[in-house]
Image (cartoon, rainbow, N blue to C red):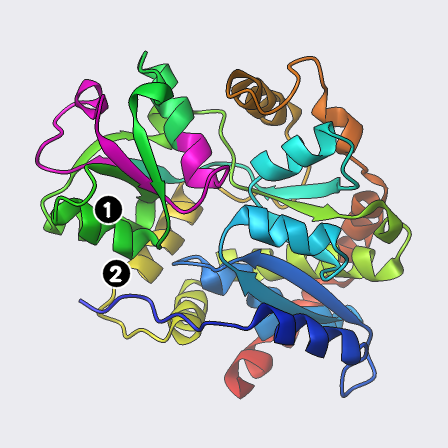
Amino acid sequence: MPSYARVKFSIALIFAAAAANTVSAQSLPVWQNGMVLPNGDAGILQMSEKGGFGKAFGVDIKITGLRGDPLVLKALIAGQLDSYIGGPASPLVAASKGGDIKIVGCGWVKQSYVLWGNSSVQTMADLRGKTISVSSPGSAPDIFIRAALRANKIDPADINFVAGGLPADWLKSMANGVVQGSATPDEYATRGKQMGLKVLTTSEKATPLSMQRCYYVRSAMLSDDRLVKFLAAEMAAYQYALTHRDETIKLTRRILNVDDKQPEATASYDSIVARNVIDLSFEPPMDKLRWLRDVLAENGQLDAKWDPEKMIDRGPLTKARALFAAEGKKAAAGAPAALASK
């Protein structure tokens, strides 16, 4: 079964090109948005760029994909990105320690992870003393696994964590016995079960307050009109993607360079829609952010008394909602032609 095709970018070249090209060929201001390399949700995540929604709102969105939330966060803080969308764990830790990072919206309000075990692991308790793979320390899978272990009264200190690779790699490593457990997005459920792996728990069961993605900027960007246009474009793009299944799945497969036999694109889309993962209001869910704060405090990563509300700025979001309400339908009208031209 084919795995996702990945392009190895030179980060330095990407950011050098972005810095040199501050306006698009159409003389629209560029907005450089970063994200972790997408999986089966690529069509939704990149609809604002590929579907022409950014340009419809007067900003040329350019997407940069990097491996792991901590790396994308560093690029944002260094000024190499205008914004980034990703898991809230690393940003919360950074902000709690005085980092210049603000949450301006949270569209993906539910987590979608599966914790797997191989043939040597039949229950959560069997994970004690075993090796689990994650993308990197502090990444979304790492945070989920640790929280799920504690929810099942297992101390993460009793687990050997190893970092590196991508979800398809982790499944293969489990099947081959190199590691005994890992967590992947739920879109890999079909592939994992075909490989003889066992679902131990899910984010819905073990960590129901976990969430997937928010939008982050540096404080200097809060007054930038491009941010308002970018957020409005994201809202319009998500609304279009969630109501145009075939077009979005097709875009996902094109981005990932896979054929229609690969199941993750369809599985991811259907799960996102069925579970209402995306909230088009982009309102930051404070109960979930405070739950995550408590998880991170238990991990020893931040002070339990620190309140995530301190890093929220709703000013750009309020303006973006009004712009989306006024211009969203018009922006969506141009999406079919934009997608056909890619």
For disc 2, the neighbor class at 10 Å (few under 14, some 14 to 19, many from 20) is: some
Q: Which residues are the magenta region?
A: 116-144
Q: What's the amino acid at mark 2?
A: Pro
- Side of 57 where 65 appears, left or right: left
**Above or below 280: residue 10:** below
Residue located 39% across and 55% down the image: 269
Residue of label 1: 189
Depth check: 39 or 298 in front? Answer: 298
Q: What's the amino acid at mark 1?
A: Ala
Residue located 81% across and 38% down the image: 314
- Side of 25 where 295 appears, left or right: left
- Side of 29 where 87 appears, left or right: left
C-alpha separation, residue under disc 1 versus residue under disc 2:
10 Å
**Above or below 297: residue 19:** below
Q: Is residue 134 magenta?
A: yes
Residue located 44% across and 44% down the image: 136
- Residue 320: x and y in percent read 79, 52
Depth check: 91 or 129 in front? Answer: 129
- Side of 335 where 309 appears, left or right: right
For disc 1, the neighbor class at 10 Å (few under 14, some 14 to 19, many from 20) is: many
Residue of label 2: 263
Residue 253 is at least partly visible in this image: yes
Quadrant in which residue 324 is drawn: bottom right
- Residue 227: x and y in percent read 80, 57
